[in-house]
Amino acid sequence: EIRKTASLSSDCKARDVGLLTSGDRNQFAEARGEILAHDPSNARSFRDVEDCLFVLVLEDATDVSMQDRSYTALTGADGSNRWFDKHQIIVDANGGLGINFEHSIQDGMTWNRWLQEAWHDMQGSDSGFSPLPKVETEFGDVEPITWNLSDTSLSNIQKAAQLAKEQINDVDMHVLEFNDFGRNLVKTWKISPDAASQMAMQLGYFKVHGKPGATYEACAMKNFWHGRTETIRSCTIESTEMCQAFLGNESDDVKREKLLKAAATHVKVAKGAQTQSGTHRGVDRHLTALKNIAELNGKDLPFFKSEGYIKSNCFVLSTSNVTTPFYDLFGFGAVVPNGYGFGYQTLPETLPFCITSYRSSPETDSKKMADAVAESLHDFKRLF
C-alpha cells in the first residue's frame, strides 16, 4: 500500500497545499479559508488530513550524516512534502526514520510514551506497559487527496514556498555527537548527568558570550492533573560562579568545588520545579497565569513590564533533555532571535546535542557554541 501511495503522489510544489502550514498560522488560516470558499469539495481534503492522527512522509532524501538527517527532519529541506500542523513520521529513501512533532496540542511525554511502547514491542522487550494489541487492518483502496485551487491559492502557495525557503535557510543547526564519554562516567563524578550537561551549556554560553544567559529547561508535569510543563531555570547564582571560576585563575580544587555546588543546586531547582516543593519551586506557569488574568481584567501590573521580568523570560538558552534508547538525536528551533535551541540526551556512553540558532542574528553561532560545550565537558572531566 505504501508503494502504491508513493506512485500516486505528486511532486508539483506549485500545488502543494502543505506548504501553507510552514509559515504564520494566521496567514494559513486565511489561505485555508480561501481554498474552502473557492470549492466546498476541498473541505473533504482538509478533513482527511486534519482528522488523522499523524501523516506519513515518504522522503526522497538519502541523507547519511546525522547533521543532514536532523536538518531534513526538522525543516523539510525546503518545506514541501510536509504538513507542519500534524505529527509527521518521516521515512527517508535509506529507511531512516524521523519524527517532526507538532507541539501545540500536547507535550513530548505523550508521544515519547507511544514511541517507547512501539519500539519495545518491535524489539520484543519490556516497555513497562502492557503489550500493544495486534490489530488486523484493512487499508482499502488508496485515494489521492485532490484540491481545486484558485489563482489566489496558487499565489499563496508560491509565497509560502518562498517564505519557507528563507526561514529554513536562516536555521543554523550544528549536531554535536559527543562520543568521548556519557552518563556512566559522569556518575562517577557524583554529579547528575543532566546537571553536568546543563552546566556544560552554561559554561559554553559564558565562553562564547562572556555572560550568563536566561535558561529554560523543559520539565514534564504529568504527575499533576492536566499537568503539562514547568520551567527549570538552570542559570543560577551558583552556575554563574562556576563559570567565573573556570574562566578565571582559580585552582582545580576551587573549580571542582564550584562545579559540584552548581550541579547540586541544579538538582534542587529541577526537583522543586517538578514536585512544586522545597525552596526552588517552579514559578513560571504561575506567573504566566497571573499575567494573563491581569490582562483579561484590564489590569496593568508594572512587574510584568519590568526589565528584570522581561530579560528573565528572554530564554537565550532553550533546552530539553529527551533521553531514550530509540532516538539518535532530538532537536528544535531556538525560541528567541538571538538564542539557541538545545535538544540533548544523556546516554550511557555518549552525550549528543542538537544545537540551533539563526544565521540572521549577529550574536549567535551554533558551531562555535557546540565547540564550547564540548570543551567544557572536557574541562569537567579533567577535574576528576
Image: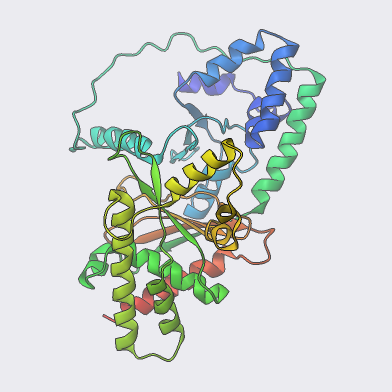
- Residue 46 pos. (x, y %): 59, 17
Q: Nearer the viewer, residue 20 or 296?
A: 296
- Residue 151 pos. (x, y %): 82, 21
- Residue 46 lies left or right of residue 225; in this view the side is right
Q: Could one spot residue 332 in this view of the protein?
A: yes
Q: Could one spot residue 173 in this view of the protein?
A: no
The answer to whether residue 108 is above or below residue 248 is above
Name the quarter where the C terminus is drawn.
bottom left
Disc count in the image?
Answer: 0
Q: Nearer the viewer, residue 275 or 121?
A: 275
- Residue depicted at 28% across the width and 56% down the height: 271
The answer to whether residue 59 is above or below residue 326 is above
The answer to whether residue 104 is above or below residue 195 is above
- Residue 220 pos. (x, y %): 35, 45
Q: Nearer the viewer, residue 308 or 149?
A: 308
Name the quarter where the N terminus is drawn.
top left
The answer to whether residue 90 is above or below residue 7 is below
- Residue 276 pos. (x, y %): 30, 50
- Residue depicted at 27% across the width and 40% down the height: 223
The figure's colour scheme reads: rainbow
- Residue depicted at 31% across the width and 34% down the height: 225
Q: Quadrant of residue 31?
A: top right
Q: Quadrant of residue 143?
A: top right
Q: Nearer the viewer, residue 241 or 371?
A: 241
Q: Residue pushed farthest right? A: 151
